[in-house]
Image (cartoon, helix red, strand yellow):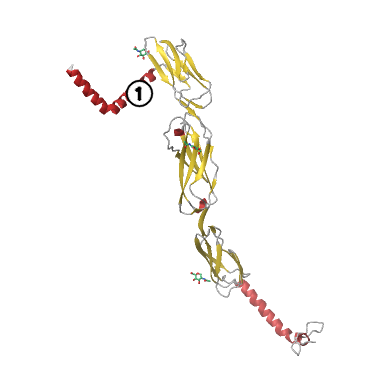
């Protein structure tokens, strides 16, 4: 008696200390037992698992593959069929109104053993809304980081939800996290996306999508999309082509310099030109007539900073055939002037070409 008592006390003490260990051991034992029973249990369910929308109906067929059978049946949270002497039995739920449904098909064998197979059932509900929240006010500033939150409301099962973020051609899949303890009932979850703002993001769109990941065997349901958020990113002006452009003066002596820069807000332009160039300025465009060689500088500036572009203007290399022609014409003209000079210039120095007798003296003196 004494012995038994002390053993009992020790055992009680051990139990208190190792309760959790014992529980784990026990559940492992049960699990492995259930698995071996399930594996050898001569039952086949079609389909072998169910994913059903809350409010919908579903049916599952359970077939016995053994003739050593006394009977079989279904047990579920919606009641049981009892023992039926058939080789198949159907579970028929007209309207799912529970978030968790336990269900199993069982069979009694002639040798007195009973075995069962559990039917995995997932009840889902599409989210009420998927919203994209900005944790900041736009516009964003280049190179800075911003958090965006995708909030998925009233969805079940929360732990099967994944969120995909879309920005232009990029997409990233993320977990949807919950604050509340996640169970089968509808709940909220959120995914956070950190954007390191780039100038290429300006004018782009960000959005998120929530969908269920039921695995390869599960249904592939349409994702729920959030409205898009237009991104505005402020950035320093920059030039798409090079910052230094080499330009040759064309034959006609007219030149247009284009200093257009990309920037947000729209850049303001300031030109620095070598003296004494005649310039006609209109924002990023500079029209030059008879430009002088030299370095022309253009500054594009906005609230985020400025960038300078240089146009190095050089004389075009001489085209000698043109030059020769010019010299030839000038020489010919000179000879012509020399020969015709005495005939067209009168003694008092006025031109006599005008047939109306017009003279310089008359034109200059008041009448
Ligand atoms: C009863 O029969 C089944 C299937 O034939 C077998 O797996 C199980 O081990 C048997 N049980 C007993 C107690 O004989
Ligand atoms: C879930 O989200 C909805 C919509 O954002 C909100 O109204 C509701 O309070 C949230 N529920 C919980 C439990 O946070
Ligand atoms: C443009 O900038 C270059 C380099 O800073 C400088 O040498 C040049 O004088 C500038 N041109 C004018 C017209 O100010």
In terms of depth relative to the viewer, which is nearer, 275 or 154?
154
In terms of depth relative to the viewer, which is nearer, 183 or 248?
183
Q: Residue at x 62, y 75 (%)?
A: 324
In terms of depth relative to the viewer, which is nearer, 214 or 161?
161
Q: Residue 221's spot in the image, x, y percent?
A: 52, 32
- Left or right: residue 37 compared with residue 221: left
Q: Residue 320's spot in the image, x, y percent?
A: 60, 72
Q: Which residue is mark 1?
A: 31
Above or below: residue 28 compared with residue 320 = above
Q: Residue at x 31, y 27 (%)?
A: 24
**Classed neighbour count for the residue bearing mark 1: other residues with Cα under 10 Å, few (<14), some (14–19), many (≥20):** few
Above or below: residue 2 compared with residue 255 = above
Q: Residue at x 17, y 18 (%)?
A: 2
Q: Residue at x 51, y 55 (%)?
A: 234
Q: Residue 115's spot in the image, x, y percent?
A: 39, 16
Question: Can you say which quadrant of the picture contains the C terminus?
Answer: bottom right
Q: Residue 25's spot in the image, x, y percent?
A: 30, 25
User: Where is residue 361, by image quadrant?
Assistant: bottom right
Above or below: residue 112 compared with residue 316 = above
């Amino acid at each position: 008696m004494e012995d038994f008592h002390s053993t009992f006390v020790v055992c009680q003490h051990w139990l208190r200390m190792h309760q959790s260990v014992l529980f784990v051991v026990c559940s492992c034992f049960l699990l492995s037992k259930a698995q071996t029973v399930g594996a050898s249990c001569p039952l086949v369910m079609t389909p072998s698992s169910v994913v059903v929308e809350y409010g919908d109906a579903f049916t599952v067929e359970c077939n016995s593959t053994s003739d050593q059978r006394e009977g079989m049946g279904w047990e579920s949270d919606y009641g049981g069929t009892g023992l039926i002497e058939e080789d198949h039995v159907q579970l028929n739920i007209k309207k799912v109104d529970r978030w968790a449904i336990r269900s199993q098909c069982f069979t009694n064998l002639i040798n007195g053993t009973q075995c069962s197979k559990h039917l995995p059932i997932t009840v889902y509900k599409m989210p009420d809304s998927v919203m994209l929240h900005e944790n900041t006010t736009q516009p964003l500033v280049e190179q800075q980081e911003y958090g965006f939150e995708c909030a998925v409301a009233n969805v079940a099962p929360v732990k099967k939800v994944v969120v995909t973020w879309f920005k232009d051609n990029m997409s990233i899949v993320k977990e949807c996290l919950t604050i509340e303890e996640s169970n089968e009932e509808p709940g909220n979850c959120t995914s956070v996306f950190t954007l390191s703002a780039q100038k290429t993001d300006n004018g782009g769109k960000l959005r998120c999508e929530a969908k269920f990941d039921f695995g390869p065997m599960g249904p592939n349901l349409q994702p729920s999309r959030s409205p898009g958020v237009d991104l505005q990113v402020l950035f320093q002006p920059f030039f798409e082509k090079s910052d230094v452009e080499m330009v040759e003066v064309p034959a006609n002596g007219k030149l247009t310099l284009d200093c257009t820069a990309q920037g947000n807000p729209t850049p303001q332009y300031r030109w620095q030109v070598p003296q004494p160039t005649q310039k006609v300025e209109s924002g990023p465009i500079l029209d030059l007539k008879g430009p002088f060689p030299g370095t022309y500088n253009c500054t594009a500036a906005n609230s985020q900073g400025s960038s300078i572009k240089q146009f190095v203007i050089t004389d075009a290399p001489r085209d000698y055939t043109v030059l020769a022609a010019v010299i030839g014409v000038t020489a010919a003209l000179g000879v012509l002037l020399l020969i015709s000079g005495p005939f067209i210039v009168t003694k008092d120095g006025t031109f006599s070409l005008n047939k109306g007798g017009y003279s310089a003296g008359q034109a200059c003196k008041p009448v």
